[in-house]
Image: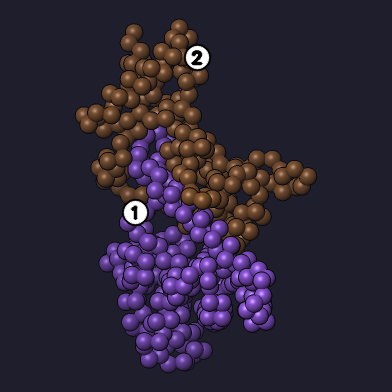
Amino acid sequence: MDPLQVKIEVYEGPLDLLLHLVKKNQVDIYDIPIALITEQYLEYLRFMKSLNIDLASEYLLMAATLVHIKSRMLLASPEDEEEDPRAEITQALLDYVKVKDMAHMLENQEILHRDVFVRHHIEEIVGEENFVFPTLFDLLDALKHIMEASKLTEAVTSTAESIKLEEKMAEIYDLLQKEQEILFDKLFLSARTKAEVVVTFVAILHLAKEGLIILYQTSPFAPIHLKLVTEPPKQRHLQVV
Amino acid sequence: MNLEAILEALLFVSSEPLKIERLKKVLPDRSTQEIRQTIKRLQQRYASSQHGIELVEVAGGYRLQTKPEMRAYIQALKQGPTFRLSRAALETLAIIAYWQPITKKEIESIKGVDVSSSLRTLLRLNLVKTAGRREGSRALLYKTTPYFLEVFGLKSLTDLPQIEEL
């Protein structure tokens, strides 16, 4: 199977991408430069498509919404007292920020089996501390950066067959067993072709999805690290009758 | 026998937060007020820095747990975390917690993306459950479980951290 055909499941939605762009460009959520954001949004979509990332229909719907808002902004005369065409996405983003705040507050509670412990436990739910977890878009940014910084040859078809996704996953996994932790960028140093870079990227996403590794940053926009997930022995609750 | 000692023993063996009503059934000769006051005394006793455990009110009952400041030692003993709630699942949980009861469609309109897999995870972990259907429609409603309160150390839903200008 051509590794470039592997579909990646995306958990982040269009609102995550919009928020990512708002933060990245440091723009005011109440006054979003719609032309700029739309352009960048579409650019991400094209980039993800080029990587064969399976995009949910919600992404396309949002793209259509953005383009529509952009055209309405162009048509509206400045003295128009009409509602701001951006209101719809501004509100959606504000609501979403609120949800993120709530999730953050929940995470900061003293959580059972993470902060406090009881004698009996059934299910362990643990949050990681002091880490920030990169979203898909942070990973895409890192990948884009790598692709731009290195001189890669195009030779996609011939090399694609020679690099197997499973082998790449195994290679990264073995490396992590030796090193415990590794810098995301470092895994791409040996890559010479675009195909190799993409396979490496897809392999990392797969390892993360299968819960074998975690990706983390020490702060937002900091370098991304990979870490092995050490699986503790499954604890069973013994019932004595 | 000393009521403090009895309550301590009951709390020690209980696998879930003990409600006053439950304690009352075990101790029919004691008044509710007496039980409440004794729990308060126990709480004060554990609050001292000489103790590594504390008695907290959670999910409508009482439980003994280790103090948060002991976490590093306990984690070293237990060697590592097991399950991590993904960001997507945590956000879905937050939406359900604050807007419950809520339908999947409503969650998705806030989150802007399909939440099927997050919802499955939360149901499997017993953090949320279904709560009938929205009136006049077939859409299932979701709400948090008492176990959710236990995990996040909340007395009740009104104990949820408040968001400014909701």
> Three-letter amino acid code at disc 2?
Lys
- In brown, which chain? B
Q: Residue at x 32, y 64 (%)?
A: A218
User: Type of residue at label 1?
Assistant: Glu
Observer able to see residue A236: no
Q: How many marks?
A: 2
- What residue sits right under mark 1 in the picture? A129
As rendered, which of A88 and A144 lies closer to the eye? Answer: A88
In x, y percent, where is residue B89?
51, 54
Q: Colour of chain A?
A: purple
Where residue A81 sits, quadrant-wise, is bottom right
Q: Residue at x 51, y 89 (%)?
A: A157
> Which secondary structure lies at badge 1?
loop
Mark 1 chain: A
Real-space CA distance between mark 2 and mark 1, rounded to the nearest whole angstrom: 41 Å
Of the 4 image quadrants, the one containing the N terminus of chain A is bottom right
Q: Chain of mark 2?
A: B
